[in-house]
Image (spheres, coloured by chain):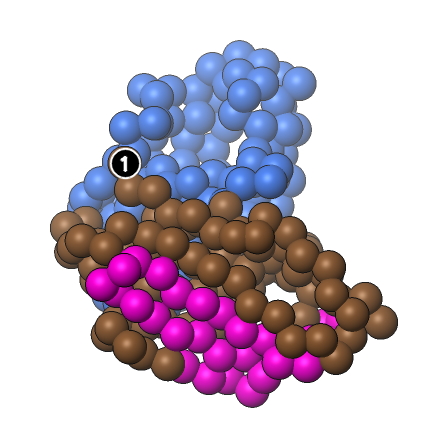
Chain colours: A brown, B blue
Amino acid sequence: ILNVEQSPQSLHVQEGDSTNFTCSFPSSNFYALHWYRWETAKSPEALFVMTLNGDEKKKGRISATLNTKEGYSYLYIKGSQPEDSATYLCAFSDNYGQNFVFGPGTRLSVLP
Amino acid sequence: DTGVSQDPRHKITKRGQNVTFRCDPISEHNRLYWYRQTLGQGPEFLTYFQNEAQLEKSRLLSDRFSAERPKGSFSTLEIQRTEQGDSAMYLCASSLRGGNTEAFFGQGTRLTVV
């Protein structure tokens, strides 16, 4: 069974702070790593799909990096805003089933 | 077609009853996934389809669970003889291809077994 871990489990920051989370995944048979944002009462929304070691992706104030050799990805949020409050999920896909295995998520609360 | 839709949004059932959920994916998407999410956990994989073929089923899934995707369009997930431990959010997602394309999620079906 593939194991995807995320840390921290939850995080409270002040508006304007920058923050980052970690996703750890198996370093063998890597195919893709996804980041999703899941706001309360909404559907999970894709942020990034990353496939290459060293990938860096950016969308507005949010960016992500990928290290497939050591099996981790970082998600960064610059200048957090209250609307960034959500659970951030990463999902790993391997070469076999190409299924998505999710981590438990990091719950972010941005206080105004 | 604005996205993935799931029906019903909420379901309360008595223990021992059967329930069926429906998922309508984005029309051109070949892949359809079912996940279960309980409080404090990330989505847990249940099964997925490539068109009408069910390609993988989680070993964690008991025989009481079955899923179909006739004609490669909508999918149904049935739980027979529900138990209280089945109470969870059931999420459906679809993607154009395999694991390197983003998945689009429905809003889920919240099941409560009493």
Secondary structure beneath dot 1 equals: loop
Residue B57 image offset from top left, x and y in percent: 26, 36
Q: Residue under label 1, please give it.
A: A1
* Outermost residue to the top: B16
Residue occupying the point 46% across, 84% down: A58
Q: Quadrant of the N terminus of chain A?
A: top left
Task: Residue at the far right: name it.
Answer: A112
Query: In the rendered structure, does residue B86 fall within the stretch colored magenta?
Result: no
**The quarter of the displayed image where residue A57 is located:** bottom left
Query: Above or below — where is A21 with respect to B22?
Result: below
Please state which of residues A28 and B5 is positioned toward the viewer in this rendering. Answer: A28
Most extreme residue toward the bottom is A60
**Residue B112: percent from the left, percent from the top?**
63, 28
Residues rendered magenta in the picture: A57-83
Q: Position of residue B35 (x, y in %)?
A: 43, 43
Q: Residue furthest front?
A: A70
Instruction: Please identify the quadrant where the C terminus of chain A is shown.
Output: bottom right
Tell me: B38 left or right of B94. right
- Crowding around mark 1 (Cα neighbors within 10 Å: few <14, some 14 to 19, many 20+) is few
Q: Tell me the amino acid under the disc marked 1.
A: Ile
Callout 1: chain: A
Q: Say if residue B6 shows up in the picture.
A: no
Q: Is residue A72 magenta?
A: yes
Q: Of A35 and B99, which appears nearest the observer?
A: A35
Side of A78 where B47 appears, left or right = left
Residue under the point 52% across and 52% down: A7
Number of numbered discs on residues: 1
Q: Image quarter for residue B76?
A: top left
Determine the residue positioned at 56% across, 36% down. B38
Please name the residue shown 14% across and 50% down the image. Answer: A96
The answer to whether residue B59 shows anywhere in this view is yes
Q: Can you give x and y, in whole percent of width and height, for residue B22 in the image?
A: 46, 44
